[in-house]
Amino acid sequence: MGDSKIIKGICIKTNALDYFGNEDGKWFLEVGKEYEFLSIRSGIKEGNHATMVVYADKINDYRPSGLEPIELFEIDLDNISEIYHTITNSDNETIIEIEALSDKHLNPIHDAFWEVLFNEDEKVNKVYFEILDRLGFRLVL
């Protein structure tokens, strides 16, 4: 999958249980397509999936995807780059995330960074896309 420092994975299937229900969720993914991951969250106690991922969604202008079940992807987690760090949150979940996109770095810019990103806040959008560009995300559709 190349020499990039970004965690990448290939979608291997599109069927998995919904977050909480007993039916398949609507996972808008394409089998065989490569995805670039912003974070991986494991140890989730509620719902059907203990580990979920967030990718940079090319279909939605590289905004973060929602949480997606990790079993939909084939991801190599053997050599995680230094651009990521691992934290444990207050729910005792382990999160592997791009450090530059962590709350520690983004809260000084805006205390609700992720919420206002989707509201087209100009400053927040500029910071987000500068970080993605600096890290080598392929910002083309």
Image: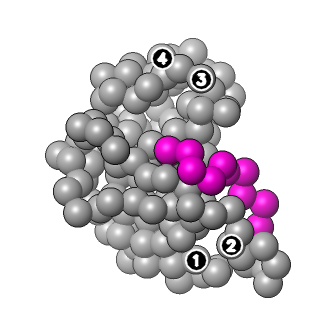
Question: For the view shown, which residue lies furthest in the right direction?
Answer: 23
Q: Main secondary structure of the magenta part?
A: loop
The correct choice, above or below, for 37 with respect to 138 in the image is below
Q: CA distance from mark 2 to mark 1?
A: 9 Å
Identify which residue, 94 or 57, lies in the foreground.
57
Q: Where are the magenta residues, as a range? A: 25-35
On the image, the x and y values in percent for residue 117 come to 59, 31
Q: Judge depth for marks 2 and 1 and give the one in front.
A: 2
Kind of residue sitting beneath label 2: Ala
Q: What's under tag 1, amino acid-wise?
A: His
Question: Label 4 near label 2: C-beta < 8 Å?
Answer: no
Q: Residue at left 51%, top 61%?
A: 73
Q: Earlier in the sequence, mark 2 or mark 3?
A: 2
Q: Residue at x 56, y 61 (%)?
A: 12
For residue 118: magenta?
Answer: no
- First in sequence: mark 3 vs mark 1: 1
The residue mark sitting in front, 2 or 4, is 2
Within-10-Å neighbours for mark 4: few <14, some 14–19, many 20+: few
Mark 2 or 1, nearer chain start: 2
Q: CA distance from mark 2 to mark 4?
A: 34 Å
* The disc label shown at residue 49, or none: 1
Residue 141: which disc? Answer: 3
- The residue wearing badge 2 is 16
Q: CA distance from mark 3 to mark 1?
A: 29 Å
Q: Residue beneath label 4, please?
A: 126
Mark 4 or mark 3, which has the lower sequence index? 4
Amino acid type, callout 4: Lys
**Mark 2 vs 1: CB contact within 8 A:** yes
What secondary structure is marked by label 3? loop
